Image (cartoon, rainbow, N blue to C red):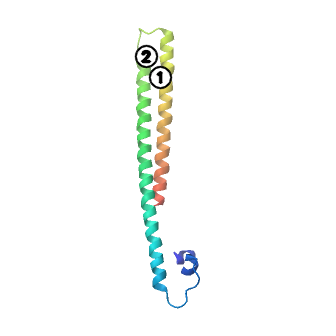
Amino acid sequence: MAELFQVTVEELLGAPTPPGDRQTEILQELENIRQHLTIRNRRLRTFWHIVTALGILLTLLGIAGAVFGFVNYHAVLNDTILSPETAAIVLSSSTSVVVKGAVRAAAGLLIVLISVLMNRKYK
């Protein structure tokens, strides 16, 4: 990491310049930092995997809701028993269900996209 930032290891750790040869202590400190970063990255990857799964679930539920509303809409259109007023109310409700389902599906896809991009960051 010190080479990456073009500073000495001592400056990177914020410690005063060590007298003598304390290179093994510095290497051990760097190893501890690396282990902590590895654990942090693993936890973040797990978090983003869970967010991705929830986004996929939201997308599937949105698609199911849209399909349900669409089927209901066409069932009412083909039903001759309902009065025009009742049909208008049901059609309005069905249209609302379709739109809400589509919005949920789009939100789920957006969550999946963001979580996949964030998951790549922590590989």
Q: Residue at x 44, y 10 (%)?
A: 82
Label 1 or label 2, whichever comes before in sequence order:
2
| Res 81 label | none
Depth check: give the residue in front, 94 or 36: 36
Alpha-carbon span between mark 1 and mark 2: 9 Å
Residue that carries the numbered disc 2 in the rendered image? 76
Q: Residue at x 44, y 30 (%)?
A: 66
Q: Secondary structure at mark 2?
A: helix
Rendering quarter of residue 35: bottom left
Task: Report the amino acid beneath label 1.
Answer: Ser
Label total for image: 2
Image quadrant containing the C terminus: bottom left
Q: Secondary structure at mark 1?
A: helix
Task: Report the amino acid beneath label 2.
Answer: Val
Q: Is residue 36 above or below residue 113?
A: below
In percent of width and height, residue 87 lies at: 47, 13
Q: Is residue 48 above or below residue 67?
A: below
In percent of width and height, residue 73 lies at: 44, 21
Q: Is residue 45 above or below residue 98?
A: below
Residue that carries the numbered disc 1 in the rendered image? 94
Observer able to see residue 102: yes
In percent of width and height, residue 111 lies at: 48, 45
In percent of width and height, residue 89 lies at: 50, 16
Q: Is residue 6 above or below residue 94?
A: below
Depth check: give the residue in front, 13 or 83: 13
Farthest residue in the bottom direction? 20
Tags 1 and 2 in contact by the CB under 8 Å rule? yes
Q: Residue at x 41, y 29 (%)?
A: 67
Crowd rating for badge 2 (residues with CA inside 10 Å; few <14, some 14–19, many 20+): some
Observer able to see residue 6: no
